[in-house]
Amino acid sequence: ASFHAKHNPPQKNMICDHCQTALTIRDDDKPEIAKRRFESYLMSTQPLLDFYRGQHIVYEVDAEQPIEVIQTHVKAQLE
């Protein structure tokens, strides 16, 4: 299962809702690691995204919406 501290927290702090085991925080969630990952994204992934946008085959998702709304929009684009 996947949880997010702010946007999709578990019901019990740091306990998985599905199997009741302790949750962990990934090492790559540290600020310095996240900064390197973002720099890598800008150099390798962003150019691909720009290319596919030019082909009109990229669908943007407003991730500030509730998960259920996002799922509905994504499923509609995939049909």
Image (cartoon, rainbow, N blue to C red):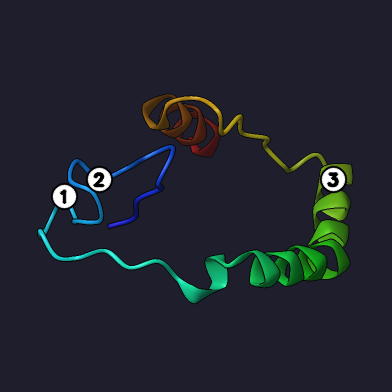
Pointers 3 and 2 in contact (C-beta within 8 Å): no
In this view, the residue in front, 44 or 72, is 44
In this view, the residue in front, 9 or 55, is 9
At horizontal 19% and vertical 56% (from top left) the residue drawn is 16
Pointers 1 and 2 in contact (C-beta within 8 Å): yes
Relative height, residue 13 to residue 7 (above, below): below
Q: Where, quadrant-wise, is the N terminus in this rendering?
A: bottom left
The residue labelled by disc 3 is 55
| Callout in the foreground (1, 3) | 1
From the top left corner, tell me how far across and down residue 56 is, in percent.
80, 39
As measured in the structure, the alpha-carbon distance from the residue carrying label 1 to the one carrying label 3 is 41 Å
| Callout in the foreground (3, 2) | 2
The residue type indicated by label 1 comes to Asp
The residue labelled by disc 2 is 10
Q: How many marks?
A: 3
Q: Residues within 10 Å of mark 3 (few under 14, many from 20)?
A: few
The residue type indicated by label 3 comes to Gln
As measured in the structure, the alpha-carbon distance from the residue carrying label 3 to the one carrying label 2 is 39 Å
Q: Is residue 66 left or right of residue 54?
A: left
The residue labelled by disc 1 is 17
Relative height, residue 19 to residue 54 (above, below): below
Q: Secondary structure at mark 3?
A: loop
